[in-house]
Image (cartoon, grey):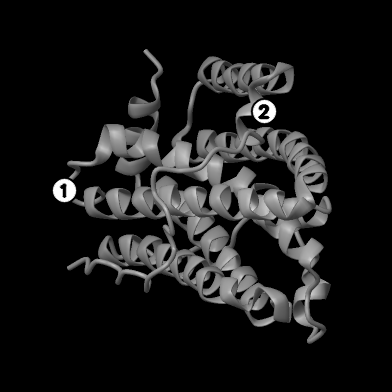
């Protein structure tokens, strides 16, 4: 019987599929770290108090990338290049979601609207990350090799999501409510398409690595399409709601250190 736990266990048990999974994850996290670092450096003068939180967000993402690389190193594996059709972060950027990399590579300060756009993009993508890590934490929190990493990354993603809620609500009170809702909706509808496409690409590659039967690959693809249909019909709305989080000032302190993997 197919289940999230059995599927991931199969990927975890095979060196090649595990290497591909960790390489994709590490690449996305490292890219997110760079983006947040540049945004922190370009924050407009009126929002300088936000810069340390954005820097903390970026430091967490960098840490997650190091964790995935360390998990590979522990098994004597080297990263592989991330296939373009599985590069979630870059595909979002190419579809105009979030802030363009050309803007982030420059030295011109961002505008307040740019920061709103960044936070809306982060609120949507951190929802996805939080849900994915919660799934892994539910099944692998006590895993001897993966457990510490899963628990730490899951907690960080929950902090990132709480931070996005709190800051977007602050900007909404300052009069940006309409632009926030517009940005959230556009980002969510684009994200669910890209997540579908990336999921199909990742599962196709895992199927080739693990030599899955055609019927198994077809069942997984059907499941991915079913998730997209649910999200397109209304599931996307969970990504655009805003509420004051229980975790207040979730990124108000320094980033925690990555665990050691002997």
Location of residue 162 in the rendering, given as x and y in whole percent from the top left corner: 48, 48
Location of residue 102 in the rendering, given as x and y in whole percent from the top left corner: 82, 74
- Which of the 4 quarters of the picture holds residue 73? bottom left
Considering the numbered disc 2 on the image, is that residue within a helix, a strand or a loop? helix
Provide the residue designation for mark 1.
Answer: 144
Considering the numbered disc 1 on the image, is that residue within a helix, a strand or a loop? loop
Q: Residues within 10 Å of mark 1 (few under 14, many from 20)?
A: few
- Which of the 4 quarters of the picture holds residue 5? top left
Task: Answer whether residue 84 is visible to the viewer in this image.
Answer: no
229 to 36, vertically: above or below: above
Q: Residue at x 28, y 32 (%)?
A: 139
Q: What label sits on residue 236 in the rendered view? A: 2
Q: CA distance from mark 2 to mark 1?
A: 35 Å
Q: Residue at x 39, y 66 (%)?
A: 69
Is 144 displayed left or right of 255 in the figure?
left
Location of residue 168 in the rendering, given as x and y in whole percent from the top left corner: 64, 51
Residue toward you, 72 or 161: 161
* Dots 2, 1 in contact, CB < 8 A: no
Q: Residue at x 76, y 45 (%)?
A: 177
53 to 183, vertically: above or below: below
Q: Residue at x 82, y 50 (%)?
A: 95
- Which of the 4 quarters of the picture holds residue 262? bottom left
Q: What label sits on residue 253 in the rendered view? A: none
């Amino acid at each position: 019987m197919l289940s999230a736990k059995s599927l991931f266990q199969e990927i975890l048990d095979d060196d090649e599929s595990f290497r591909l999974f960790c390489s994709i994850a590490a690449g996305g996290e490292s890219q997110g770290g760079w983006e947040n670092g540049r945004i922190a450096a370009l924050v407009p003068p009126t929002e300088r108090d936000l810069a340390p939180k954005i820097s903390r967000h970026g430091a967490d993402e960098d840490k997650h990338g190091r964790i995935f690389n360390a998990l590979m190193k522990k098994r004597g594996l080297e990263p592989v290049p991330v296939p373009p059709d599985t590069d979630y972060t870059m595909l979002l950027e190419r579809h105009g979601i979030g802030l363009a990399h050309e803007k982030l590579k420059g030295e011109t300060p961002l505008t307040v609207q740019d920061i709103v756009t960044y936070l809306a993009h982060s609120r949507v993508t951190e929802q996805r990350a939080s849900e994915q890590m919660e799934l892994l934490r539910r099944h692998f929190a006590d895993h001897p090799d993966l457990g510490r990493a899963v628990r730490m990354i899951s907690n960080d993603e929950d902090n990132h999501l709480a931070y996005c809620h709190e800051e977007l609500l602050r900007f909404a009170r300052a009069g940006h409510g309409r632009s926030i809702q517009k940005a959230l909706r556009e980002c969510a509808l684009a994200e669910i398409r890209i997540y579908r496409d990336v999921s199909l690409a990742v599962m196709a590659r895992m199927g080739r690595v693990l030599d899955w039967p055609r019927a198994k690959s077809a069942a997984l693809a059907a499941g991915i399409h079913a998730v997209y249909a649910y999200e397109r019909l209304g599931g996307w709305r969970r990504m655009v709601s805003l509420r004051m989080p229980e975790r207040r000032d979730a990124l108000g302190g320094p980033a925690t250190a990555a665990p050691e993997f002997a």
